[in-house]
Amino acid sequence: MQTALAIAFWTAAGLLVYGQFVYPLLVAALAPGAAEPPAVPPDDELPSVSLIVAAYREADVIAAKVANARSLDYPRERLQIIVACDGSPDDTARIARETGADLVLELPRGGKMRAQNEAVVEAKGAILAFSDANTMWAPDALRRLVAVLADPEVGYVCGNVTFVNTAADGSATNQEGLYWRYEMWLRERESRLRSVTAGNGAIYAVRNDLYKRIAPSRGHDLLLPFSTVKHGSRALYAPGAHAEETMVPSIEGEFARKRRMMTFAWPIVLRCGMLSPRGYGVTYSWMIFSHRALRYGAPLLHLVALVASGLLAIDSAFYLVLFGLQIAVPVAAVIARLLPLKPLLVVRYYVLTTLSIGLGLWDHLRHGTPAGWTPPEGTR
């Protein structure tokens, strides 16, 4: 019994350390330095693009988003701006139309993916680009995305999103910005090594013929990169394609957002072939296991390590110390609520993010995944 518990503990702890520390170092060693960005094609060689913004209750930001899209450094005659309103109860559609969107769809409430699917039906571009209503792109962002897709081997590309704290008094506690700086660093190296293992909804583009119509209970952030690789193309990251988005101010708000997002992610993990190595090749299979499978398995691995060390601690001072160190992590996360110091806030962010993965699975198994979506508080 003791031997089995020790094996369980060290296996779980080893996988956690490997996934979060060793794997990034290995990827960095295999893809050192920085890649030269691809040359942007001249205007007469740029493909037609349909930029699609799915919107629900976005009256406060949609005018700025349409203006941002119209101001992009891209030939206007080759850019179609589509706003797909998902049953918005406010003036989102009217404002989008008045501020210059090329096409505004007023759809019955059906979820973000259904709105995107309907917009793609009306899209005329050879390239489909997607963005959120509260995401502002840098003027050259679209050109930089398209430059990556100029390589016929590339089918998908995501850009570099920065999460901005808009609290004037600096009271925001969310550590999402720190996490995304790390995530973008890792994705840049994964991109150079083979392909990214996930994207983001703020700024990405895909060839029209590689777009996948998926159920409203799923999302492109996770599905499009690996499905593009299975198709035989590459899914890359363009660090020079910049976008900014307002982050949820509090860690607790971010926890709620991530828990909801994980209800969309779990159907993809469990049912859409993400964990199947078919079509990946050895390198990408290793990346999916290390970056995705271990990340989504982290709540279970933590639980196994905690329970195994707790049982072993009955007869071992060594395991008692290890058990105590694990207990100290959630305790520090609780203390961060009262004493918001940066190191404690980072610990709290990690604990709640990991918890959101497990609770997202719990929500999905109990209730399924609702198609509806609402803008997170504090981000508009």
Image (cartoon, grey):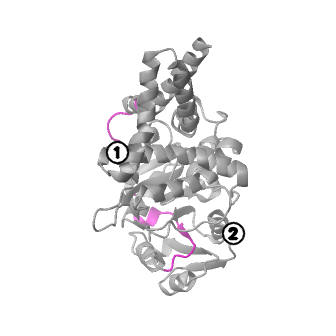
How crowded pointer 1 is (Cα within 10 Å; few <14, some 14-19, many 20+) is rated as some
Residue under numbered circle 1:
344
Give the residue drawn at x 53%, y 57%. Answer: 256
Q: State which region is magenta.
A: 30-59
How crowded pointer 2 is (Cα within 10 Å; few <14, some 14-19, many 20+) is rated as some
Residue under numbered circle 2:
110
Q: Position of residue 29 (x, y in %)?
A: 37, 29
Give the residue drawn at x 45%, y 35%. Answer: 193
- Secondary structure predominantly adopted by residues drawn in magenta: loop
Q: Is residue 94 visible?
A: yes
Is disc 2 placed on a helix, strand or loop?
loop
Q: Quadrant of the N terminus?
A: top right
Left or right for 163, reference 209 = left
Q: Position of residue 185 (x, y in %)?
A: 38, 43
Give the residue drawn at x 42%, y 46%. Answer: 334
Looking at numbered disc 2 in the image, what kind of residue is underneath it? Gly
Is disc 1 placed on a helix, strand or loop?
helix
Residue 44 shown in magenta: yes
